[in-house]
Image (spheres, rainbow, N blue to C red):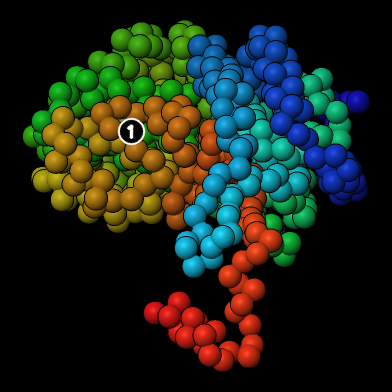
Amino acid sequence: MDITADTTPQELTATRERLRVAWQARKPDLAQRRRDLQRLREAFRAAIPAMDAAISSDFGHRSAHENLISEAMVTLAEINHALRHLRRWSRPQRAAVGWKLWPATAELRYEPVGVVGIIAPWNYPVNLALVPLVSAIAAGNHVYLKPSEHTPRTSAWLRQLLADVFPPDRVAVALGGAEVGAAFAALPFDHLLFTGSTAVGRKVMAAAAPNLTPVTLELGGKAPAVVCADFPIGTAAARIATGKWFNAGQTCIGVDYVLVDAARRDALVHALVHELRERYGHDFVHTDAYTRVINESQFRRLHGYLADARERGHAVVEPFADAAQRHAALIEEEHLFPPVLVIDPAMDAEVMRHEIFGPILPVLSYSDLDEAIARINALERPLALYPFSNDRGRVDHILASTLAGGVTVNDTLLHFGAHGLPFGGVGASGIGAIHGRHGFETFSKVLPVLRQRRFAASDWLKPPYHGHIDRLIRWLAK
């Protein structure tokens, strides 16, 4: 098998059918699912060095430690969590039927749906492909995966890894560009998961609609951090810096903009600049810890946002301006985009109209907390929200007045790694949820089953409705 060859439309249809026929012939039982996950874990561990090389090559450079944290650690933790809890998740659960249906009993069964399609993005090309795959396999499905064409070496690595672990009629990988992705989304899957931009998510949902394919969308949006007046500026800056510049800001739940009380805006800016210089050094371009922007198109898009901010006269803070000037050619060649702060941009500026998905951070000041909340609510509901306050009342006020896909209080990103929490958006930031049990349930049909006994009261509830039957029904209907 050529692990780099694009998939043809004919192969897409044939492969989906092969996966479906095999699943119908022999649905994976609990023992098979556990063996599959155990083999995946061992193969993945052995292939981490090759994964690191593939991702770094696709990005031009990505921090090896960021690869270990975001790809290896998260994926292995998801596999281990599923193995630890799968037996319990799979057990039928008793359900109440109410005394009027006595002596019937009921249960909820978790049944696999069939063939699950997964369309993964480029920003975390392994984690966001394998984490949902783990859930789908744990639930007893077969899987067809379409990784991103923007990370071709990583996609080929995924194809080889999964071919080594699974038979081709249980898990398959399709490769190709936008045309292949569109045809993939139009296949009659039993469930389809897409992770990516809101704009492409709309197209995926439209492609799935003729088949009435259930769709889970993991999208994005403008995730705000709100620094309340009581929270220490230094701590906020350190944690926001992690949530913003990890993976050079190319994170769907990364901090997109910061709201801070007006009296401390400049203090936060200074603290963020200090954090950046401590992390990446004053020279910046020679650090191995900073990831490149994925490609030329994304690099130009980000420069366009920054040009718009400058044209509008917004203050732009460049912590590494000197190094950027000295190494301008290298920065251009490697798509190395230094961290930049934009101070109090207008709400119609490009950096506030779009999800930034890069290392530009708008810092906005507010006069009171309700003004900050109003600014958040003026935009689409985000995938993540980060309130910073040691006052529970303030945090609860923010949570009660806004709505986001998920929240980490007094830190950033961490709710993604909590396996007991569902991960998903709301409205424009997504539909449905994955991770842990929530992912298992997403790729399962929760099947309600009512069991009737040999003799039951319902045997009497039939015409003619006379006498005591009439009186019984009227009494039950009260």
Q: Residue at x 35, y 11 (%)?
A: 279
Question: Does 64 sit above or below residue 404?
Answer: above
Q: Is residue 461 left or right of residue 380?
A: right
Q: Is residue 401 left or right of residue 327?
A: left
- Judge from the rendering whether residue 227 lies leftward or rightward of residue 353; answer left or right: left
Q: Nearer the viewer, residue 163 or 455?
A: 455
Q: Is residue 269 above or below residue 14?
A: above
> Can residue 128 be seen?
no
Q: Residues within 10 Å of mark 1 (few under 14, many from 20)?
A: some
Out of 120 and 478, give the one closest to the viewer: 478
| Outermost residue, left side | 263
- Splitting the image into 4 quarters, where does residue 150 fall? top right
Residue at (14%, 45%) from the top-left corner? 369
Quadrant location of the C terminus? bottom left
Q: Which quarter of the image is occupied by the N terminus?
A: top right
How many labels were placed on the picture?
Answer: 1
| Residue 82 in picture, x, y percent from top left | 59, 27
Mark 1, residue position: 408
Q: x, y (%) of residue 142?
A: 77, 39
Quarter-of-image position of residue 389: top left
Of residue 186 and residue 122, the one placed in the foreground of this image is: 186
Q: Residue at x 18, y 47 (%)?
A: 397
Q: Residue at x 62, y 58 (%)?
A: 450
Whether residue 435 is visible, yes or no, is yes
Amino acid at the residue labelled 1: Thr
Judged from this view, the residue extending furthest toward the front is: 468
* Residue 104 % position (x, y): 58, 59
